[in-house]
Amino acid sequence: MLGPGGVGGLLAALLTRAGSSVVVLAGDSTSHAISERGLRVESRLFGNFEVNVETATRLQSEVDVCLITVKATQLERALERVPADVAGQALVIPFLNGIDHVDLLRTRFRTNVVPATIRVEVARVGPGLIRQTSPFASVEIATSDVVRERIEPLAAQLRTTGLAVTLREDEVAMLWDKLALLGPLALLTTHQRGNVGVVRTIRRDDAIALIREVAAVARAEGASADPEAALRLLDLAPETMESSMQRDQAAGQPLELDAIGGAVLRHAAAQGVPVPVTTRLVDELQARERARTER
């Protein structure tokens, strides 16, 4: 597990509790803290529990699967912890926001990269302390004839933890399905500095416009994105739900703005699809970030 943040910490803890052998890869201080105190989870879905897990700062031997759960802003540096020659034939499963990370990973690990997505509200409260608050936690993993025999046992392992797991035949559609909701949600909650309930109430017109823009880009790329379905999911989300990008902004951390909003803009430009509301929000958030870093 590369990156024991919110998603990585939760997955590592759940898999360990279910009996899987897990090694968490992290920096010196985080690795030391988890080695000493283990992983602690506070979850409305999975209960409160602690597990001991092996840690390292760099992959030392071959594994069956490497789950990549770092932020997009940390990806290239974090990959130094996973030498391609040591990873060998391991399946590389990235749970990153956005789309463009898949090509980046395939330049390093070739055909062993299998994209995945996760829908969950979870946060790393401190080194090794994970808090999961959403009433849902679901995983989708791309599959194909090439990797099916290796993916299905992994899906079974994840299901034993209590996660809802779906296998998808079309990785492009899978990634765009998530971005069609995640993109508008992340951009608006961060721009508004408010949770889903606030966005639904006072930024609904922007939310509808953003969802339609991202869906239009997705359809231009061959995915059958449904803007009405994305809007229904937004309306079903808990009103207190926050996006990870919103929390990063509040904490003064780098934003995944390029991986999320920037990806939509790049693919829109390549397909000739106008996305004026997305462009405005990305531009304004970029300006806000520049002002913050220049202080």
Image: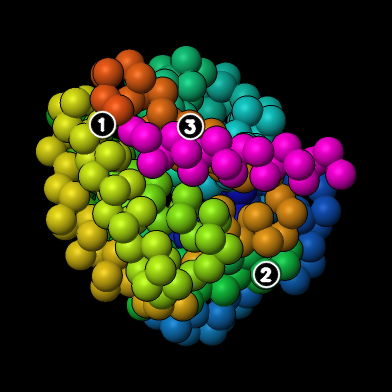
Seen in the picture, residue 71 relative to 163 is either above or below; the reply is above
| Labels 1 & 3 near each other (Cβ < 8 A) | no
Q: Which residue is mark 3?
A: 262
Q: Is residue 48 above or below residue 291?
A: below
Tag 3 and tag 2, C-beta contact below 8 Å: no
Give the quadrant of residue 102.
Answer: top left
Residue type at mark 3: give it.
Answer: Gly
Asked if residue 217 lies left or right of residue 260, the reply is left
- Cα distance between the residues tagged 1 and 2: 35 Å
Q: Viewer-proximal residue, 211 or 144?
A: 211
> In the rendered structure, does residue 140 fall within the stretch colored magenta?
no
**Is 291 inside the magenta-drawn segment?**
yes
Callout 2: few (<14), some (14-19), or many (20+) C-alpha neighbours within 10 Å?
A: few
Q: Position of residue 158 (x, y in %)?
A: 34, 59
Q: Which residue is mark 1?
A: 217
> Mark 1, residues whose alpha carbon is within 10 Å: few (<14), some, or many (≥20)?
many
Helix, strand or loop at disc 1? helix
**SS type, badge 2:** strand
Residue beneath the point at 44% across and 34% down:
279
Q: Identify the residue shown where x is 75% and y is 71%.
A: 37
Label 1 or label 2, whichever lies nearer to me, is 1
Which quarter of the picture shows residue 225?
A: top left
Closer to the chain start, of discs 3 and 2, is: 2
Q: Earlier in the sequence, mark 1 or mark 2?
A: 2
Res 125 label: 2
Q: In the rendered structure, which segment of residues is drawn in magenta?
A: 275-295
229, 291: nearer the viewer: 291
